[in-house]
Amino acid sequence: MSLSIGTGCPFCGTGCGLSVECTDKGFKVKGDKSNPSTHGDLCFKPIQMAKGLDANRLTTPLYRIHKSEPFREISWEDAITILADQIKILPLESLYFYLSGQLLSEESYLFTKLIKGYLGTNNVDANSRLCMTSAVVAHKMAFGSDGAVGNYADLDDADVILISGSNPAWAHPIIFRRILARKKSHPETQIIVIDPIRTESAEKSDLWLGLHSGSDTMLYNALLAEIDRRGGCDNDFISRSCEGFEQTLDAAQAIPYHEAIQSCGLSIDDTDILVDLFASDKKIVGLWCQGLNQAVDGVMRNLGFINLFLATGRINAHKGLPFSLTGQPNAMGGREVGYLSNALPGYRDVRNPADRIACEHHWNLSSDTISPEVGITITDAMDAIMENRIKLLWVACTNPLLTLPDVEKTKKALMNEDLFLIVQDCVMSETASLANLVLPTASWGEKEGSMTNSERFIKRVRRFKSPPNGAKNDSEIVCSVAKTLGFSGFNFVDTSEIYDEYKRLTQGRLCDQSTQEYENLSYQWGGERLYKNGVFATASRKAQFHPILSSAPQLNEDEFVLLTGRTKKQWHTMTRTGAIAELLKDEEEGCLLINPAEAKERGLSEGDRVVISNGLGKLCLPIRFGTLAYRHLFAPFGYPKTPINTLVPANNDPISFQSALKSACVKLTPSLDMYQY
Ligand SMILES: Nc1nc2c(c(=O)[nH]1)N[C@H]1C(S)=C(S)[C@@H](COP(=O)(O)OP(=O)(O)OC[C@H]3O[C@@H](n4cnc5c(=O)[nH]c(N)nc54)[C@H](O)[C@@H]3O)O[C@H]1N2
Ligand SMILES: Nc1nc2c(c(=O)[nH]1)N[C@H]1C(S)=C(S)[C@@H](COP(=O)(O)OP(=O)(O)OC[C@H]3O[C@@H](n4cnc5c(=O)[nH]c(N)nc54)[C@H](O)[C@@H]3O)O[C@H]1N2
Ligand code: SF4
Ligand SMILES: [Mo]
């Protein structure tokens, strides 16, 4: 007997629609041709994942009073009571919650309702802080609201696809496949990649701009000034639909074009190509991801990139648009339900009295229950734990020990004996191994709900197998804790009731989905593109230019820039992909990418182990050759045995508080003893 179940992919923000064939022999994952967003396309990751669904699963709650003790198995009833008791005993201001863009919308909504509504604290954050908050803030500053503007179909008739700080060939493979399909059917289409590494995406492009890491603002300002000088700005659009252009242009003109381009490590011949394209009528779709988001000037990099599109009237189907790619499968949904420390459901903000009242009313709470104070962010929470200001941390669906900056600091915070650490995960992650209480969860394929992808398309995620005995749904865990705390408002019969309650909070908002039925949820909120007719979500209804300060950091002579990011087949900290042989092939261990010439200068060959170090620590990695900007290295961050964030300092963008995870300064020395570290 065989049964096909329509669902969504649990990996990247492309959000492919899948169809899972369940037979006596197991599960076969295929593309769902009826999915309007991705039309049945899919990459190898979910196909392979079906082989590892049951690997290393947790099935019993685990508990210990002191972190030095071994865990003991306890019942679910005891686990929920212990957790609820801790929440009751501890002062509200000492509680903290850390969620994930890999939770389903209904799960993140329930957490938000419990924490912000019923408990009345905004001390909650999500791993989107490490991923998308610079983009979130930039969207709000430029357009008046969060929400990616673009649409995958815009790639199908683009003349130019400009990719900056993103390697979709690895990280968003189906979006990249769509780009290559356009190139194949229309060879005149130009693919241009701005990235310090000649990535697979760059390799397959028409033009690679291998800029020095951190010089994005210098580049975008220089391009803007030069486009304007050559008469390429769309002055009609600017005066009709935008504000702030003059000051922005002034800032962009601060450094002469030639000087600016040189300090980015680029050639004028190459950047002139971009200037000409922006000054033309061609349709340009601009994609970006972590190379712009994860930086101390992440918001400014985003805004600098967006400025180029606004200045040339590119917010439409006709001439193209800027399109921020989302990393995780449901970071968009998490943002919509308001899980970040400043947000409320329906793209609302805790600082806005009307927004608080709308949620309080919806949740039958008395007025002034929701706090108007923005909660602290996850990196600040680590400091607060070390200062004993936070005494309970409930982590769900993320593995912060390896993915927050400065691993030693995170470890010290999480191991603080005064911190009661709860980790809700389907496997014994590195973070779970430090916990007081581990709550075993159901995972993808075992639970129901919805997710929103990069182009704002919402789809259902369906259950096609039972969770291992003993594992519970994330939603069920939140509701059980809420009920044990004595809160009404958490008695849901099924997931559709949770969605229905949430969707009513989106009525009249940009992410309005209030008329959708849960059963066949398949909907792109906002339509194909946002801001049709040049009307924006700002108070004046005009898009906002923001002046950007140009920067292009210089390196000390004996240092390298260590870039960090992903591999093609592994997923983050490997908990979902590390046990699958096909996905481990060629990616068995962390490695360090280096230019062959720079390696040879130091007498190094491929495979040699080297030590990279800075004031935070050191790591030993085998080297591989690649093509990168001069004095740049690259290493993937997710390998537990070589946790790269050991070397990445906890520096944040001052506006988005997103951590500058994309790079760190390191020294490189040959390893004398490869087993020493
Ligand atoms: N296989 C796989 N796919 C994934 C994931 C995974 O773990 N594995 N994770 C998903 C998630 S959550 C995310 S957020 C996305 C991330 O997707 P991407 O952002 O595309 O991937 P990264 O490897 O983090 O970084 C992208 C590029 O930014 C470049 N970069 C570094 N510094 C700079 C700079 O200063 N300027 C510019 N312009 N570029 C720079 C890097 O060289 C790198 O090639 O991937 C998603 N997809
Ligand atoms: N240096 C550096 N650091 C980075 C980045 C970088 O580019 N460079 N990228 C950052 C980015 S963009 C991201 S998104 C983060 C990702 O960082 P994390 O979110 O910390 O990494 P994951 O490995 O995806 O962790 C997800 C956890 O959820 C568990 N899980 C899976 N399914 C379920 C479920 O259904 N329920 C529950 N409760 N748990 C489940 C998994 O077992 C795993 O332990 O890393 C960030 N850190
Ligand atoms: S491109 Fe992303 S969403 Fe699509 S199948 Fe691959 S991992 Fe899943
Ligand atoms: Mo991410």
Image (cartoon, rainbow, N blue to C red):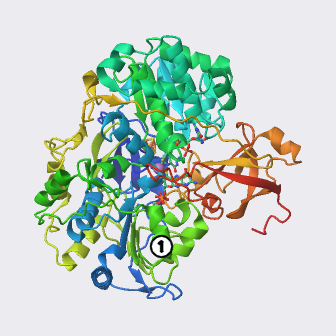
Question: Split into 4 quadrants, where in the image is the C terminus?
Answer: bottom right
Q: Is mark 1 within 8 Å of ligand 2?
A: yes
Dot 1 crowding, Cα within 10 Å, few <14, some 14–19, many 20+: many
How many numbered marks appear?
Answer: 1
Quick check: 495 left or right of 40?
left
In the depicted view, which residue is nearer to us: 372 or 381?
A: 372
Task: Report the residue at 79% width, 56% height from top.
Answer: 610
Task: Report the residue at 27% width, 30% height from top.
Answer: 536
**SS class of the residue under badge 1?**
helix
Q: Is residue 197 visible?
A: yes
Quick check: 279 left or right of 479?
right
Q: Amino acid at mark 1?
A: Ala
In the depicted view, which residue is nearer to us: 185 or 640?
A: 640
Q: Say above or below: 363 vs 258.
A: below
* Position in image of residue 522 (x %, y %): 24, 40
Q: Say above or below: 83 vs 139.
A: below
**Quarter of image, ligand 3:** top left
Disc 1 target residue: 432
Picture quadrant of residue 470? bottom left
* Position in image of residue 644 (x %, y %): 63, 58
In the depicted view, which residue is nearer to us: 553 or 29?
A: 553
Task: Report the residue at 46% width, 28% height from top.
Answer: 248
In the depicted view, which residue is nearer to us: 173 or 285?
A: 285
Quick check: 153 left or right of 248?
left
Q: Is residue 2 visible?
A: no
* Position in image of residue 354 (x %, y %): 16, 51
* Position in image of residue 653 (x %, y %): 50, 50
